[in-house]
Amino acid sequence: MDGQPQTRVSVLVSTYSRPEFLRLALQSILAQTFTDFDVLVWNDGGVAMDELPELADPRVRYHHHSENLGVMHAVAHGMRATQGEYIAHMDDDDEWEPEFLANQTRLLDEHPSAGIAFCDHWIVAEDGAIDERSTEHNSRHWGRLDLRPGLHEPGYEIAFDGTIPMASAAMLRRSALDLDDAPSELRFAWDLWLSYLATRGGHGVVYEPRRLSRKRRHAAQMGSPVASIANLTDLVIAYERIWSEPRFAVDREQLARRLAAASANWSIALLREGDASRASRAARRSVEVRRTPRGIAAVGLTSLPAPASRSIARASSAALSRWRRWTQAAHVGQGSH
């Protein structure tokens, strides 16, 4: 980007073949009480949606990428194409309360050392109805119910806990980010990576406990409750990169726990798919970083004959799947951040 930002806030909306939800998302953006913003709708290789009436608003630009980049690189490309001093991201199936942009902009204005402002959010059903029980459980699970409002420094302590709902309830300070630093291997872990970029320079995070965003739960989100190999691969890649960054003043013990856990889980997932060689390397890396019962179990599992290790890994994943389905049904249904 050349010169000074032309707007205070740029809103990036990531979309893929969901025009009915995209319309609602755009309507909530265009109804904001804060008016100094522009919008970039980034269609990542989905069906064409350029005829939506909301796209005719002069504040909105629409980009239809010819190929699907995956969420990580769609967000990176999209953010680089924005020009605001601050950047807010929204998934196309979510919505904002009218005060969202005004509140988040004020927080970053008042706290120049913060790289991220964020708030809590509602969980809503497909038809937009608020699910208060799921909302309360979600806020408690991610640590937002007991989180003190205001500035937190260092910011990474919150960013790494998964507390920040980066997809639809956060705003970033552009000057805190190196948007060109988007590892080509990453596909999905964009929220973790942006949290890292926004805090690695020593920036804090600032929290607003009001629920100013709405996270929609719908059938298209229903996936396997067992973490996919792709997601686990991303976690390991991201944590390894962060681990190797000497300038990042992260709590090394906290990071070691996360890298060890991700490597052990990745090992078991690889065994489940029959990739014994990579599974063995991942298990050894887990205990090399930090010896944990799960890492040690993963090492033991990879030493068994391939049929046995794969069978046990599948049984373990199936048991975890049943447990997660039970807890999700008991608490909030399908999980959301």
Image: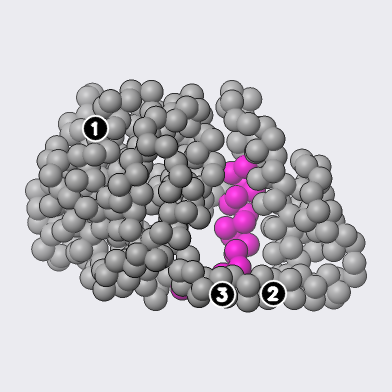
Question: In the picture provided, is 24 more to the left or to the right than 260?
Answer: left
The segment highlighted magenta reads: 222-239
Query: Mark 2 = which residue?
Result: 319
At horizontal 59% and vertical 25% (from top left) the residue drawn is 249
- Residue 26 x, y percent position in the rendering: 19, 57
On whether residue 238 falls in the magenta region, the answer is: yes
Q: Earlier in the sequence, mark 2 or mark 3?
A: 2
Sequence-wise, which precedes: disc 2 or disc 1? 1
> Amino acid under label 3?
Arg
Residue 239 showing in the rendered view? yes
Q: Is residue 49 left or right of residue 203?
A: left
- Secondary structure under tag 1 reads helix
- From the top left corner, tell me how far across and down residue 255 is, in percent: 65, 38
Around disc 1, counting alpha carbons within 10 Å, would you say few (fewer than 14), some (14 to 19), or many (20 or more)?
few
Identify the residue at horizontal 69%, vertical 57% (top origin): 266
Q: How far is the residue under mark 2 from the one under mark 1? A: 46 Å
The residue where tag 3 is placed is 325
Image quarter hosting the C terminus? bottom left
Q: Give how far apart the Cα atoms at labels 1 and 3 are.
A: 40 Å
The amino acid at mark 2 is Ala
Q: Mark 3: which secondary structure?
A: helix
Q: Amino acid at mark 1?
A: Arg
Tell me where residue 258 sits by quadrant: top right
**What label does residue 333 carry, if any?**
none
- Residue plotted at (20% across, 63% down): 24
Observer-nearest residue: 154 or 19?
154
Q: Is residue 117 above or below residue 279?
A: above
Say if the magenta span includes residue 228: yes
Give how far apart the Cα atoms at labels 2 and 3 are.
10 Å
